[in-house]
Image: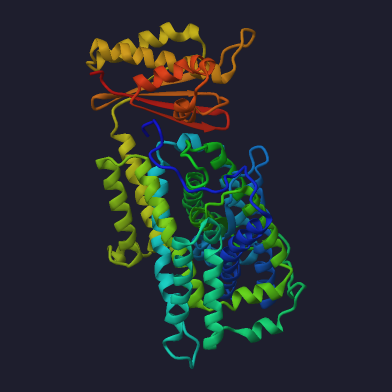
């Protein structure tokens, strides 16, 4: 990613640290809660009804899913230490686990499902500590592809919702109510003021529901019969562990789906950062790690409660992009409202009574916005021939698997039919192709030294040897030497290493990529993001600040691009150097 003055500024009215008016917080929090509450109601219902679960237990599974989703949503927004992303990321039941969850219930009942969901949570917690090792595989391009695949996978379901009409009604009721919803959202978002845009989604739902009432397709009777406050008839089945043969047979399938779901989580955690700040920032991978920790905790809780697994839902990215409000208070409010909704059957009945065409039209707008967000992530990471090939093949191959057009007689039965899912098939292909690109890259050379200026002679000798072996000119060798020196100086300053502190170790890797050389500096974590600091250099006016950031200015002049990835306990600075002209 080349640095310089941002080419565009996001239309963000409230950044994560800012405080919108209370009415905005509550209004958007309710919209986010309303977006995920439907899946929290339907997915446990589908799973346990398919496995012939009792009505009493299904009520418990739905209640537990809502409560756990609300708690996890608040943890995502608050960010305590290494727990949480610090962004508005809604948590809720996910459709990715539906096939394997049904299989677990049919093969071993509730204890087997609970044990496997707990195992998924442990896998997520372990992965959260090691995502820096996957940085060359789970790239922003792969994350963007996952977002595209998720949205396209959902579109057939949305189109089916648009056509649903109650028995005995005329065929026109569905398109009329759906059109009213879409028209209200688009008109308010495009022609209204900033304040009006905030309420465009909820206005679409309200207008669509009013039209549905007039047309007679809104289930008013179910709303009347629902209690205002109370709990459903439910029974917790108690947590039991099951480590029999069926556990070990199904564990690989659950771990595989968990890995794909983790990549999806990483994609959403990266995506929400892209739309939450006015000026583009480097991705904070510590926030990504925090989002995985919360996902792991929520699945541990889901397993203990014996309900379906939990995951990040993408609706918050779309709503943030549409309204321009990224304040953390919205996510906290959404989590609190989810907890409240679990105890207010009347409100749940109002949401469930929204006709399918109205809800489908609303979600279609949200998905369309998220599709564009995925494309932006791919473009920002830089489109090369290989990356373009990976995106195209993964996207269209995923569609081929979903529609059963790619050798279904051989592939449909693999891993319990997992490859029949567009997301899993396309995501796996994207990961495999990206791994292949890494394998065919030129060999890397590396040296491990102290993060101290005394290591500069060893680094210079290493880079000179590398330059001579790869046929670099003396000017290129000098430029590599200067780039490494300024980067080490900057890293040492950001580490805050003093005279009485022992220097920390870091690894320098050099790789020849066509005519360019890519240097990667891996060290313990620093305080500031170098990539962001370089972007802000244009705004520095104070002479003392300019002198202090001299190394950054020199580095920006010498390097073609600089990318700084910050993880807990690890810093990765990647510098691309082109031959001098």
Left or right side of 565 for 48: right
Work out whether residue 303 or residue 92 is closer to the camera in this orientation and state it.
92
Q: Is residue 414 visible?
A: no
Asked if residue 484 is positioned above or below residue 358 in the image, the reply reads above
Work out whether residue 240 or residue 548 is closer to the camera in this orientation and state it.
548
- Residue at the far right: name it: 230
> What residue is drawn where x is 52% and y is 81%?
211
- Rendering coords of residue 59 (x, y %): 68, 72
Question: How many circles with numbers are drawn on the protein?
Answer: 0
Work out whether residue 169 or residue 534 is closer to the camera in this orientation and state it.
534
Which corner quadrant of the image does residue 186 belong to? bottom left
Left or right side of 260 for 209: right
> What residue is drawn where x is 73% and y is 72%?
234
Work out whether residue 234 or residue 89 is closer to the camera in this orientation and state it.
89
Asked if residue 411 is positioned above or below residue 346 in the image, the reply reads above
Left or right side of 2 for 263: right
- Rendering coords of residue 16 (x, y %): 59, 44
- Rendering coords of residue 454 (x, y %): 49, 6
Q: Is residue 569 visible?
A: yes
Rendered-image quadrant of the C terminus: top left
The image's colour scheme reads: rainbow
Rendered-image quadrant of the N terminus: top left
- Rendering coords of residue 223 (x, y %): 66, 81
Which corner quadrant of the image does residue 434 belong to? top left
């Amino acid at each position: 990613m080349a640095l310089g003055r941002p080419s565009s500024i996001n239309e963000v009215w409230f950044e994560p640290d800012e405080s919108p008016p209370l009415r905005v917080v509550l209004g958007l929090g309710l919209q986010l809660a309303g977006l995920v509450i439907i899946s929290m109601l339907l997915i446990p219902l589908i799973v346990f009804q398919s496995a012939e679960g009792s009505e009493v237990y299904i009520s418990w599974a739905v209640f537990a899913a809502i409560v756990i989703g609300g708690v996890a949503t608040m943890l995502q927004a608050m960010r305590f230490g290494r727990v949480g992303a610090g962004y508005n990321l809604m948590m809720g039941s996910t459709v990715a686990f539906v096939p394997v969850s049904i299989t677990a219930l049919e093969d071993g009942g509730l204890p087997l499902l609970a044990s496997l969901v707990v195992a998924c949570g442990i896998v997520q917690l372990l992965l959260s500590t090691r995502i820096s090792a996957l940085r060359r595989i789970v790239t922003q391009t792969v994350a963007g592809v996952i977002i595209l695949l998720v949205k396209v996978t959902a579109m057939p379901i949305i189109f089916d919702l648009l056509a649903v009409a109650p028995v005995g009604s005329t065929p026109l009721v569905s398109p009329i109510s759906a059109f009213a919803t879409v028209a209200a959202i688009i008109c308010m978002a495009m022609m209204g003021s900033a304040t009006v845009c905030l309420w465009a989604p909820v206005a679409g739902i309200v207008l669509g529901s009013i039209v549905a009432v007039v047309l007679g397709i809104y289930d008013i009777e179910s709303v009347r019969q629902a209690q205002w406050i109370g709990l459903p008839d439910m029974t917790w089945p108690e947590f039991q562990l099951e480590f029999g043969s069926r556990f070990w047979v199904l564990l690989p399938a659950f771990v595989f789906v968990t890995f794909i779901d983790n990549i999806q989580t990483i994609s959403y955690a990266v995506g929400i950062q892209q739309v939450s700040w006015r000026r583009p920032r480097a991705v904070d991978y510590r926030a990504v790690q925090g989002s995985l920790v919360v996902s792991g905790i929520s699945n541990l809780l889901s397993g203990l409660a014996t309900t379906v697994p939990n995951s990040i839902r993408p609706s918050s990215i779309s709503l943030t992009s549409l309204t321009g409000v990224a304040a953390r208070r919205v996510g906290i409010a959404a989590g609190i409202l989810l907890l409240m909704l679990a105890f207010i059957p009347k409100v749940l009945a109002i949401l469930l009574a929204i006709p399918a065409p109205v809800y489908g039209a609303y979600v279609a707008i949200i998905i369309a916005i998220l599709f564009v967000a995925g494309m932006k992530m791919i473009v920002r990471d830089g489109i090369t021939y290989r990356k373009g090939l990976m995106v195209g093949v993964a996207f269209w191959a995923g569609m081929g698997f979903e529609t059963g057009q790619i050798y279904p007689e051989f592939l449909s039965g693999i891993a319990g039919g997992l490859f029949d899912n567009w997301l899993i098939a396309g995501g796996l292909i994207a990961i495999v192709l990206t791994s292949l690109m890494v394998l065919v890259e030129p060999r890397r050379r590396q040296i491990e030294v102290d993060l101290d200026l005394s290591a500069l002679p060893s680094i210079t000798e290493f880079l000179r040897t590398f330059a001579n072996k790869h046929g670099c000119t003396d000017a290129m060798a000098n430029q590599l030497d200067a780039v490494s020196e300024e980067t080490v100086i900057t890293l040492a300053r950001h580490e805050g290493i003093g005279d009485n502190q022992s220097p920390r170790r870091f690894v320098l890797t050099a790789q020849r990529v066509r005519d360019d050389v890519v240097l990667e500096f891996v060290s313990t974590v620093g305080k500031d993001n170098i990539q962001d600091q370089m972007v802000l250099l244009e705004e520095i006016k104070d002479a003392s600040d300019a002198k202090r950031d001299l190394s950054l200015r020199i580095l920006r002049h010498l390097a073609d691009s600089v990318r700084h990835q910050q993880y807990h306990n690890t810093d990765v600075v990647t510098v691309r150097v082109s031959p001098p002209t």
